[in-house]
Amino acid sequence: MHYLIRLSLALSESFWFLPAVMMLMAVGAALGSTALDHQLGGAWVQNIGWVWSGGANGARSVLSTVAGSMMTVVSIVFSLTLTTLAQTSSHFGPRVLRNFVTDRGNQFVLGTFVATFLYCLMVLRTIRSVEEQTFVPYLSVNLGLAMTVGSLAVLIYFIHHLSQSIQAEQLLAGIGKDFEQILPRIFPVSQQEPDQAEPWLKAERWQASWVIAAKSDGYLQHIDQESLLKLASEHQLILKLERRPGDFISQGMPLLYGLPGNEPDTSLIDSIRACFVQGRQRTPQQDAAYYLHQLVEIAQRAMSPGINEPYTALSSIDWLGACLRRVAAYPQPSPLRRDDKGNLCLMVPVLGFNELVKTTLTPLRLVAVSNPDVVVHTLKMLTNLAPALERETDRQALFEQAQLLGKMAQEELSFNPDCARVQEALDQALSALRSLH
């Protein structure tokens, strides 16, 4: 199971997997079509006027031309992709590179051209022009021509898709939609329970516990909680996880603590440690803050003197507010996980609305205070977000952020004519949050 999780994470981050699958499909299509050509023969093409029906030399010329053209197009696609990646990385930050690498549209385009090239090569090797053994795979050649026409359509799609994907509005909207899709996995309804976790959070309960430490360095990408729950239930253990996906873990840092105090055997420790997947970079599958940090980074870069695109920063703030609104709509998950018998087996660190607010609005506030338009827009975002907050702690978190942003902006813009506009937006935000406070 753990190997499947690691493989799934690796494939989801790879640029080559879909093109490789399409290449295998092209090989299968070439073998199947040439086998069918052996069965059909060449008489059927004489009755159809609109299909290609040349000789062996003509078939070689057609397929050779198509194969050479596909490689030329592939080189152009690679050049455009690399150029776009370089410009996007310098403009929006290196985090957004993952969005392009994992984009199925880009992978499909590359796979189409490479598959067409490989198909033509596989069919080309079957053509024979010896008099007594002449074989021209008419069906396969016509299928290759059809794939060429399809590749031209894909090329047009690629140009359109690439031009759309580098636009700031499209990029921000894609990040917001991706965040919306992962929320049900990060805040599952099944993990809500009424019992209190405070007694288990006390340090004295874990003084006699044993610890399992990390054996390598890297970002924690995935925790297989189902396997941990099963192991803890089978061995009657209570495991307290110290890390969550997105944290950087160095060798020797504790991954979890366990009770009762008798340390398990080596095989069980290895099984527990295998439930933690580490890698060189963060992944969004279980990391709620991943996409929010992307939005913040884009906003920070947009407000930098080198780029100076405040409207991109305003759009980032809009999508950040939309993401926080979706988080506020989810119930706070319990840190306790129980097995089918109701026995407590796991305690996991929960990432709630308050922490997400602090980790996103704090770095944004530090760079936004000198721009009155960004400050006012952020305060309006908090004002619009206030009616969606049902928990008192959530309102308190936004109330504190609005106060800090307003105080820092007033100090920074004390002699700026827009200071009155900032004060008005601050009053509206505090009033909206205080009315629910």
Image (tube, rainbow, N blue to C red):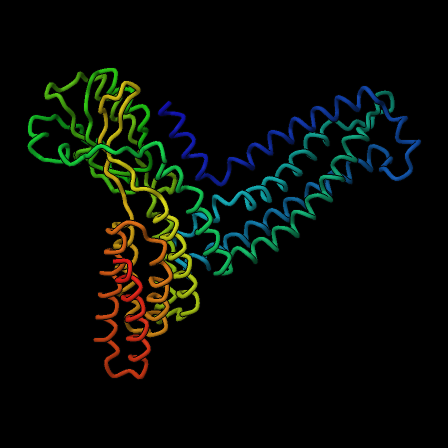
Specify the quadrant of the image occupied by residue 198. Answer: top left
Q: Is residue 394 above or below residue 64?
A: below
Residue 47, image x, y percentages:
93, 31
Q: Residue at x 77, y 34 (%)?
A: 141
Q: Is residue 27 left or right of residue 15?
A: right
Q: Is residue 188 left or right of residue 334?
A: right
Q: Residue at x 43, y 65 (%)?
A: 312
Which of 411 and 336 lies nearest the eye of the viewer? 336
Q: Residue at x 24, y 31 (%)?
A: 336
Residue 370, image x, y percentages:
29, 73
Quarter of the figure that contains the N terminus: top left
Specify the quadrant of the image occupied by residue 342. Answer: top left
Q: Is residue 299 left or right of residue 342?
A: right
The count of marks equals 0
Which of 375 and 164 lies nearest the eye of the viewer? 375
Q: Is residue 397 above or below residue 19?
A: below
Furthest residue to the right? 47
Which of 313 and 337 lies nearest the eye of the viewer? 337
Quarter of the figure that contains the C terminus: bottom left
Residue 406, image x, y percentages:
25, 70
Q: Is residue 324 above or below residue 311?
A: above
